[in-house]
Amino acid sequence: MISNEMASRINAQINRELFSAYFYLGLSAQAESSNLNGTAAWFMAKHGEEMTHALKMYRYLLDQDATVKLEAVSAPPAQTAGIMDMFERTLSHERSVTGAINDLVDHAAHEKDHATHIFLQWFVTEQIEEEATVNDILGRLRLFGDQGQGLLMIDNELAAAAKKISATAPAA
Ligand code: OFO
């Protein structure tokens, strides 16, 4: 059993994870409409990952005999200004999620809720990887360009990365 306050904070995080999934779904559609099929596959794979994150928290609340409270999910950006903008928004989004996870960890520590504190460690590690991956993609876009051959190469790399994400997706 966890406190009502802790459960309510985790419910808010479920909403953020569902928003993340929605955010990536929107970017996937925009990338595919621009014929960036590898990029679209990568964002779609991220969509799947974010759903898994939401479901991990959903499962945790139920296992802790707490109430799952699903709220409305905000709309993601309807338009972006190309691939660079997509990944810049992705990085800033993931940084905000990292901040929210850190706040949850702080609160679990404050409540001396050891179970939740341990549960959240997986998310702390996951955020490091997510930010590093997006930073790497942005670095390559800056280096090789977001048009022509450079863009084609990066789009192909993202197609390969999407396959790996899907193949190694953790079970909820
Ligand atoms: Fe759920 O890790 Fe990204 O947002």
Image: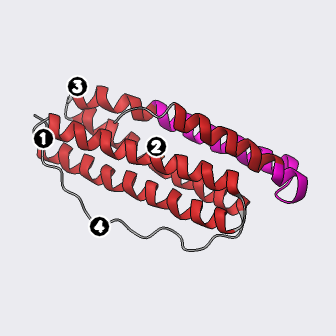
Q: Main secondary structure of the magenta part?
A: helix
Determine if the magenta segment contains residue 130: yes
Residue on which the image places disc 3:
114
- The disc at residue 3 is 1
Q: Which residues are magenta?
A: 125-152
Residue 97 marker: none
Q: Real-space Cα distance between discs 3 and 2?
A: 25 Å
Q: Nearer the viewer, mark 1 or mark 2?
A: 2
- The answer for how far apart the CA atoms under marks 1 and 2 are is 27 Å
What amino acid type should be assigned to the residue bearing mark 2? Glu
Task: From the image, tell me which residue sits under label 2.
Answer: 49
Where residue 133 sits, quadrant-wise, is top right
Label 2 CB-ligand 1 distance < 8 A: yes
Mark nearest the camera among 3 and 4 is: 4
Look at the image and say whether residue 135 sits in the magenta stretch. Answer: yes
Q: CA distance from mark 2 to mark 4?
A: 20 Å
Name above or below for residue 33 compared with residue 158.
below
Q: Position of residue 92 (x, y in %)?
A: 57, 54
Closer-to-camera residue (12/31): 31
Mark 1 or 4, nearer chain start = 1
Secondary structure beneath label 1: loop
Q: CA distance from mark 3 to mark 1?
A: 12 Å
Q: Which residue is mark 4?
A: 72
Q: Residue furthest bottom?
A: 78
Q: Is residue 160 left or right of residue 51?
A: right
Which residue lies at the image location 82% right of the left edge and 52% below the top edge?
152
Whether label 4 lies within 8 Å of ligand 1 gets the answer: no
